[in-house]
Image (tube, grey):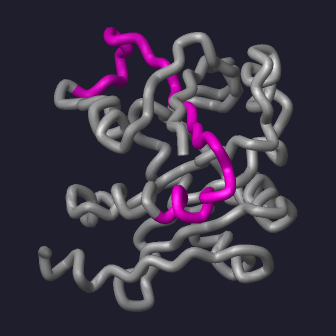
Amino acid sequence: MEPQLAAINLQTLTGPAIQPYLPALARLRINVFRDFPYLYAGSLDYEQRYLTTYLAADGAALIIAKAGEKIIGASTCLPLASETPNIQKPFLKNGMDVTSIMYFGESVLEPAFRGQGIGVKFFKAREAHAKNFSLATFCAVNRPPDHPARPTDYAPLDKFWQKRGFEKQVHLTCEMEWTDIGHTSQTTKTLTFWTKTL
């Protein structure tokens, strides 16, 4: 085990215990999702409003990663039945029971701490929290290979997700809107779901 990884502490929080960490999670989301492929031009006000969903949803969890007292990463999950209609829609359309599915939200980690196994621990912690559910799912944005903002060294996370046991479900997609970095208005993006039987 690398010394830096050994110093990282992960903690799973639920209910009111999530509240004090929402500002830090909002900042992480804005910073991490600025990068390709999300290119997300977020605002702190919107983020903190959005993240209150995790306070209201029964069964939601926030996993935080701390280096000492500093929060350097976070990961979220909540029952799919508590998610927005656009996230539920493809599952309902395919006759799937949303009450048996746990939705994995973001995993965000400061760049200096990547490649040390923390992402794997985030998945394990969320799966442990979802032990009473039959399926886990998350979605990822689709960007064309020739997108002008795609870095030359960009490596998709598909292989990492496959190693975690997730399979891409091309028939399960949803749409979301946000403003890309360098743009002035929101545009619609298509995201594809990945699933894993628990």
Tell me: 132 left or right of 117.
right
Point out residue 28 in the picture as x, y percentages from the top left corner.
51, 61
Point out residue 14 in the picture as x, y percentages from the top left corner.
71, 74
Residue ID at (53%, 63%): 128
Q: Nearer the viewer, residue 97 or 3?
A: 97
Q: Nearer the viewer, residue 187 or 55?
A: 55
Residue ID at (54%, 46%): 198
Magenta stretch, residue numbers: 125-151
Q: 157 above or below 175? A: below
Point out residue 190 in the picture as x, y percentages from the top left corner.
61, 18
Residue ID at (36%, 56%): 119
- Is 127 included in the stretch rendered in magenta? yes
Task: Locate the N terminus by quadrant.
Answer: bottom left
Residue ID at (41%, 11%): 144
Q: 77 above or below 184? A: below
Tell me: 102 left or right of 40.
right
Q: Nearer the viewer, residue 27 or 197?
A: 197
Q: 184 above or below 133? A: above
Picture quadrant where residue 67 is located:
bottom left
**Count of picture labels:** 0
